[in-house]
Image (cartoon, rainbow, N blue to C red):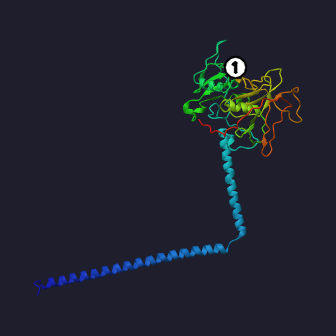
Amino acid sequence: MSNLPQGDRETRRAIEEFTRMLRQKSKEEREALLIQARDEALAEELAEARVQSEREAAALREELAYDPAKERDRARETAKSAALLLIMLLLILLLIAAATGRTDILPIPGVQVTQTLGPYLNGTTTGEIGQAVFIPTVPVGVTPEIDQAFRPYHDYLSGLGNECSIGYPISPAYSSNGQRYQWFQRALLKEIPAYAVDDPAWAIQGELLGREVTTGIPFPTTQPFLSEVQAHNFRETGYTVSGGFLNFWEKCDGLHVLGYPISDPVYEVLTPGQQPSQVQYFERGRLEYHQDDPAWPVQFGLLGEIKKKDEHFHANIIMPAQPGAPVSQPAATPTLIPTATPVPNPIATPTVLPASTTLPLATATATAVPAPTAYPGP
């Protein structure tokens, strides 16, 4: 028998009953939540199954509705888009080539390009050749000393053979635009600072005298052909060096002193009143054939001496006569340097030159031109 009063016992029973009701209600809610979760899972599975069924039905409808004509039209549209994209890319390359002067980006057979050797620091933003005609004066009868910057390379060329010498200096060394220069009888050497050239071998090189004195001359070109030992076609500029000129270019470090050819062999009046001689112009100089000098039949041109006497000198090239064009000067019989016949690929079209009398030279053994060298950028 409980000692609680009657009123307290009723209150306790009411509380217990209410607690049981709350517990019962919580259990039902839990069951309701479980049922709800199960229904949601089933609904998601049904939705995924419905989406998959719709995909399969769509694929089946496309397969059943396949139309070859429509597929051809679709393929044509795709091809047009691809062609348009290719044209846009080519236009972009052409714009880059025009802006940088690198017309060798898209080489076209038979078209002259204007790529230059190594670090090209002597130009303008428009690709024009800067005039490098400043020659410091020296007292009459005084021969300047070879600058220490150029002495090793000058001696190196002389060591290759007497014919490889660029002559004695005709000016003291001087600095301009951060580079050091010195004029010699047959070349203008320049020293590029170490920070501006990646390959030390290109720290000393010839200046672009050949391009400077031939600016505006439309040298004819020939179609490219397979190079051989005695005739090398330079893809970089589209011109060919062969025979005695090629032998000299290989022996006398032509890549650094002369650069690439910017003409095929042509004729030029070297001395007023005399018959024209065969010459060939390169980026940095000129080669001449002298039939009256059996010891040195091929020589560097005296562009240094010429520019010292006439800073406005321009090459006096005798161009081949065009069919139907009037004859502007008496016919001459220039001496032709022996050359090798190139192997055409598919057909080599040599530049037509005036009639010439071929005088043979002693046979020389030449090695093949090495593979093109990657030249450093500024």
Horizontal side of residue 218 vs 166, given as left or right = right
Q: Quadrant of residue 18?
A: bottom left
Q: Position of residue 94 (x, y in %)?
A: 68, 44
Q: Which residue is mark 1?
A: 308
Check the picture and name the quadrant holding the N terminus: bottom left
Q: Position of residue 98 (x, y in %)?
A: 68, 40
Of residues 15 and 278, the one drawn nearer to the viewer in this rendering: 278
Secondary structure found at label 1: helix
The location of residue 143, given as percent across then percent down, is 64, 15
- Considering only vertical position in the picture, is 17 above or below 102? below
Quarter occupied by residue 301? top right
The number of numbered badges drawn on the structure is 1
Q: Is residue 215 visible?
A: no
Residue 77 vs residue 375, the one in the foreground: 375
> Horizontally, is 266 left or right of 95 in the view?
right
The residue most toward the bottom is 1
Residue visible at 17% across and 85% down in the picture: 10
Q: Is residue 340 above or below residue 34?
A: above
Residue 193 seen = yes
Q: Residues within 10 Å of mark 1 (few under 14, many from 20)?
A: many
Report which quarter residue 315 is drawn in.
Answer: top right
Residue at image position (71%, 61%) is 76
Q: Height in image: 200 above or below 142?
A: below
The disc labelled 1 sits on which kind of residue? Lys
Q: Position of residue 280 (x, y in %)?
A: 75, 30
Is 358 on the left or on the right of 213, as rendered? right
Quadrant position of the C terminus in the picture: top right
